[in-house]
Image (spheres, rainbow, N blue to C red):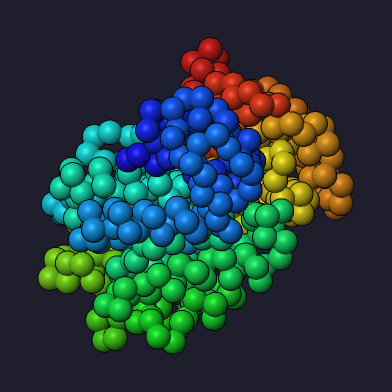
Amino acid sequence: MNVKIDSRKVVLGDTFIALNTLNHDGHDYVNDAILRGATSVVVEKGLYSVDTLVVNDTRAYLANYMKEHYYDQIKDLKLIGMTGTNGKTTTCYLIYEALNLLGVKTAYIGTIGFYLDDEVRPLSNTTPECLDLYELLIECVQAGCVYVVMEVSSHALDMGRVDGLMYDYVIFSNLTEDHLDYHSNFRNYALAKQKLFYKLKPSGKAIINVDDDYKQYFLIDENDNVTYGFGSADYQILNDSMDSFHSIFSLKNGNNIIDYESKLLGKHNIYNLTCAIIVLTFIMPDIDLRPVVFKLKAPKGRMDTISYGDNLIVIDYAHTPDAVSNILLAVYELHPSHIYTVVGCGGERDRHKRPIMASVACQYSDECIFTSDNPRTEDPEHILSDMVQSLDKQNYEIEVNREKAIYMGIQKLVKNDILLVLGKGHENYQVIQDIRYPFDDKVVVENIISSN
């Protein structure tokens, strides 16, 4: 492609489009792009030494440009898009995994990267910028993919990264506390996510969790809506139970009831599995999905478990109050002697959720250790102070150093105890100031165990 949005990728003859992102103004890089060989630029302001097109909105220009010049290359791809606060990564990964198991070549785009064939490639955003997204989709076409399943974040929808794309399936999981530093309030947050449901093809299906308080934002009249949940729904979840190794549940659709068994644990994963089953049922209506569902595994960093003597250590990406609550309630059903939780909150992100996160963790844990989780340029002590400022319970300790906090948690384990290490999951780094330091919760746990 001869258009670029990253000045570092510009080669002679390219057009550079200056986008404003969450952290950068693309206009700051126009001169760098020109030095690297850009012969024209698209901007919202300024005069430059090469052909310059000034537009009102460079994002809208880029979306229209990509659709006009490249949409024909991807128009036959079938797109599955999912939005919601929690469950996107696991659900999308399960659909990706299941379709490939069923012989339908599928790629995944989301929080844990770009998955195509045996390659996993990291992404800088859950939902890439428009140009980057088109490049990935074209690559999927060239590789022979039939489906692409992708997480569609509220930021991406609000910033127009998926403008011009149309989806065969759109899914809503839930709306809980997150990203209010960006959206200001829940209504704006819901309206951003709602945009995905206006990008459904006329023949497509909209799949909505009707147990969620914000469901009405996503039940768009002109869409073919399919509902799911534990309450009254097109696909009603019944008879759920769990032991240390399996979740068991039934799905009722009309007069048809099918029993499923999964290695994924917890009520939140039953929601995730239900979404996947609904999509698979529409795509392959004549297939018995039960053997495939039983084979499915969660993606990296989602309820990763490590045995330690008679105890269990669980590593999970849970980084919102609702996600922390979900995983604590899931492990509570395993009837451990004690539950210990190591968790923190990210810097430069929604401060409002910090005390809520801490309160939820203390409510359902015997003891908590509050620690750092990507403090970025914020003072970690300040973040931790926000977390504990209004706590009623005193069953917590504070340890800024995350590795030490994990060590302290492991030292508490005696017999039939569970330690939750939450917040980072698949991430293999810790962001302190503007530097990414290598840090992987699972590796840290394994190293501590082996040294013991």
Q: Is residue 343 left or right of residue 117?
A: right
Q: Look at the picture and state if 222 lies above or below 298.
A: below
Task: Give the number of callouts.
Answer: 0
Residue sitting at x 49%, y 59%: 60
Q: Is residue 244 left or right of residue 34?
A: left
Residue sitting at x 50%, y 36%: 50
Give residue 283's position: percent from left, percent from top.
20, 67
> Dividing the image into 4 quarters, which one contains the N terminus?
top left
> Dividing the image into 4 quarters, which one contains the C terminus?
top right
Q: Is residue 378 left or right of residue 208?
A: right
Q: Quadrant of residue 433?
A: top right
Nearest to the observer: residue 429 or residue 63 = 63
Residue sitting at x 23%, y 50%: 106
Q: Is residue 286 left or right of residue 328?
A: left
Q: Residue furthest top?
A: 451
Q: Quadrant of residue 290?
A: bottom left
Q: Look at the picture and state if 101 lies above or below 344.
A: below
Give residue 184's position: percent from left, percent from top.
72, 61
Give residue 438's position: percent from left, percent from top.
55, 21
Q: Could you tell me if residue 219 is visible in this image?
A: yes
Residue sitting at x 39%, y 28%: 11
Nearest to the observer: residue 242 or residue 2 = 2
Q: Could you tell me if residue 300 is visible in this image?
A: no
Give residue 435's position: percent from left, percent from top.
63, 23
Nearest to the observer: residue 209 or residue 251 = 209
Q: Look at the picture and state if 316 lies above or below 9.
A: below
